[in-house]
Image (cartoon, grey):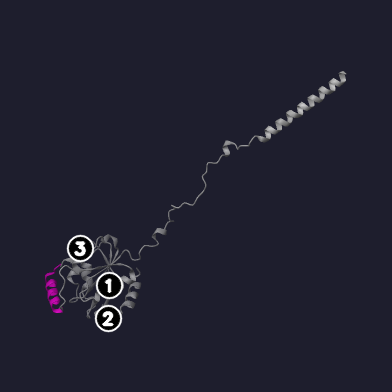
Amino acid sequence: MKKLISVLLSCGLIFAFAGCSQQGNTEAGNTPTEPPATMESTEEPTEPDSTEEPSEGTENQEETAGSNILIAYFSWSGNTEQVAQEIQSQTGGDLFEIVPAEPYPDDFDETADRWHGERDSDARPAISGQIEDMSNYDIIFLGYPIWSSDLPTVNRTFLEQYDFAGKTIIPFCTHGGSSFGNSTNRIAELAPEAEVLDGYETYGTDVADCADEVAKWISDLGL
C-alpha cells in the first residue's frame, strides 16, 4: 500500500513540473522583441530637394553676350547708323544714338553752316538723353560722320560728358574720302585715360555692303 501511494505521488510531481515548464515556454514565446534604444532610428525619409541651388556657373549661362559693350553713334544722314546697327548685330552690344538736343537741319548747306560755326567756336552742343550707368561698359564703339576731316562737336560733348578712364574706345566713321582725318587724335585728346583701338572707316555710299568688312574688323580686334 505504501508503495502504491509513493508511485502516485511521484507521477503527480512529474505532471506538475511538465505543466510549469510548458507555461514558461509559452510566455517567453509571446513576449515581443524590441531593439535596444541605441538602434532606434530618427532619420526622416529621404526626398528630392526641390529648392536645390544651381551648380556654380549655371546661373551665368544665359547672360547676354556683349553686355559690357556700348555702341554710341551720331548719324546725320543715316549712313553711320547702318554701320552701328551692323556692329550691334555682330557684338550684341547696347545701342545709344547721340541725338543733338537741337537737331541739325535736313538741308545739307544749312547743316554745313551750323557745323562751321560750332567748329570755329569749339562749341559743345547739348545731347538729348544720356547713358544711365556708364560703369556698366568697358568697351565703347564710337561712331560719327567725318565733317571737315574732324570729329563732329556733338561727339565731343559725349566724350566730355562721361568718365572713360580705363575703358576702351573703338572709333568707326563714314566719310566722303578723307578717312578718319583728325578724328582719332581728337578722341585721344578728349578721353586721355582711355585706350583707343584701331577703328573702322567706310565711304558713306558703301555702308549697305559693310557686313563682311565689319565682321573681319571685329574679329581682328580680338574682343
The segment highlighted magenta reads 108-124
Three-letter code, disc 1: Ala
Name the residue carrying label 3: 161
Q: Main secondary structure of the magenta part?
A: helix
Using the numbered discs, state the Cα–Cα distance from disc 1 to disc 2 in whole angstroms: 14 Å
Quadrant in the rendering for residue 146: bottom left
User: Which circle's residue, 1 or 3, is located before the other in the chain?
Assistant: 1
Q: Which residue is mark 2?
A: 206
Task: Say whether residue 108 is left or right of residue 222.
Answer: left
Q: Amino acid at mark 3?
A: Gln
Furthest-top residue in this view: 2
Image spot of residue 111 (x, y percent)? 14, 76
Asked if the residue under mark 2 is in contact with the one under mark 1, i.e. CB atoms within 8 Å, the reply is: no
> Marks 1 and 3: which is nearer the front?
1
Front residue (pair 91, 28): 28
Q: Amino acid at mark 2?
A: Asp
Vertically, is 184 above or below 12?
A: below
Q: In this figure, which residue is indicated by the disc labeled 1?
A: 84
Label 1: state its secondary structure: helix
Task: Give the residue displayed 81% in from the left and 25% down from the top.
Answer: 11
Residue located at (27% from left, 81% from top): 206
